[in-house]
Amino acid sequence: MIAKKRILMSVPHMGGQEEAFVKEAFTTNWLSTVGPNIDAFEAEFSQIIGLPSVALGSGTAAMHLGLRLLGVGPGDEVLAPTLTFIASVNPVAWLGARTTFIDSERTSWNLDPQRLADTLKARAKVGKLPRAVIVVHLYGQSADLDPIFEACDAYDVPVLEDAAEALGTLYKGQSVGARAPVSAFSFNGNKIITTTGGGMLVAKNPEWVNKARFWSTQARDPGIAYEHTEAGYNYRLSNVLAGIGRGQLLVLGDRVRRRREVAFTYRDALADIPALSLMPQASFGQHTNWLSVMLVDPNKGAVDRDGLIRALDAANIESRPVWKPMHLQPLFKDAECVGGEVAEDLFRRGICLPSSSNLAAEDQAFVIATIRRAFGA
């Protein structure tokens, strides 16, 4: 059987109010990178996270400016998880620094706190501590922040939280992105809420947010002339797209509930297939399950991960592997990696399934039936 229309992995889902905010921008001619929607979007986002915010053109831009705020520059080392999307670490290279990758732990699939602590201890012994540590909250699940911050605080190494995949995720009741000096979020079209493209930088220090805003608008100095004493970027979000973001924030809670429902529907409907298991739900937080991710045990079923992807594709269903670890990427072939075995195993066996919050029940049932057929169940 083949789906008449391709069932995609994660698509935008409008809530109903977005169009009104966008229409207001057109009606009032605020069609630039300034305007009421941007101001309101930043304020409303700050109420959710609890920190000052600046709206940017992408989550990658937020990562870039966040690393610059932490002082990352030429010759510096930054520690980061190897199991992540490349946007988490590309900005490190843009700033002239290098990334050392750290393996995952199996409880959350995120940065292994013990390997991080061991690496920091080793760096301290030789007097070469990293400039910063990037923590990624993968697929909507929080990293285990207490031991990570304990390790970093012991050596005064600052943390940048990459929460691009994790708006709505909680760690011990607190929103991810609220603990680090600076954090980044994404509103790409496939995220849990979207502005079609966009991101947000949040920071504990309001002056850092002001500096990021200054850099994001080409770092133009005050005054009537176009004068510049610092390098800047064209990173500001538009007032039109901020209107979409305002409407999306209104339905964030509904989107989180629905993504979790989709994931648990897969879990329950496939529970009798020994080869399949849902990504762990770590006890220390609320996993939004931005994507429904499962592991395939090739020793317990009729197909392996790649075979399942092929079976789904043949039925006109999109699925993808878990992120390919950074230390396996040709771009980073010379980078150091601490461990890597866990991340490699998760990549080899992990599959991301259709997870949209507007995924129709009959479409999810078709995905489940296709998976069951692939396993002969």
Image (cartoon, grey):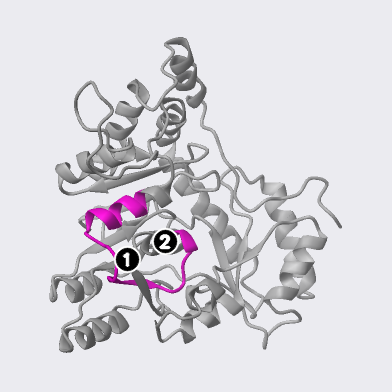
Residue identified by numbered label 1: 134
Instruction: Pinpoint residue 40: horizontal percent, then vertical percent.
Output: 31, 27
User: Which mark is drawn over residue 111?
Assistant: none
Q: Can see residue 51?
A: no
Whether pointer 2 and pointer 1 mark residues with C-beta atoms closer than 8 Å, the reply is yes
Look at the image and tell me in which quarter the N terminus lies. bottom right
Dot placed on the residue nearer the N-terminal end, 2 or 1: 2
From the top left corner, tell me how far across and down residue 320 is, in percent: 64, 64
Q: Nearer the viewer, residue 266 or 349?
A: 349
Q: Is residue 256 visible?
A: yes
Q: Which quadrant of the structure image shows residue 212?
A: top left
**What residue sits 81% from the left and 51% below the top?**
3
In the rendered structure, which amino acid carries the disc numbered 2? Ser
Residue placed furthest toward the top = 27
Seen in the picture, residue 289 relative to 75 is either above or below; the reply is above
Q: Is residue 69 magenta?
A: yes
Q: Residue drawn at (55%, 48%), measured in percent from left and top?
A: 190
Q: Residue at 29% of width from left, 45% of height from top?
A: 231
Query: Does dot 1 land on a helix, a strand or a loop?
Result: strand
Mark 2 is surrounded, within 10 Å at the Cα level, by few (under 14), some (14 to 19) or many (20 or more) other residues, namely many
Camera-side residue of 135 and 249 = 135
Where does the magenta region start and end? 62-87
Q: Residues within 10 Å of mark 1 (few under 14, many from 20)?
A: many
**Quarter occupied by the C terminus:** bottom right
Asked where in the image residue 91 lies, by quadrant, the reply is: bottom left
Dot 2 falls on a residue whose secondary structure is helix
Residue 53 image offset from top left, x and y in percent:
27, 40
Kindly report the distance in space between the C-alpha atoms of the residues bearing marks 2 and 1.
8 Å
Amino acid type indicated by mark 1: Ile
Residue, disc 2: 88
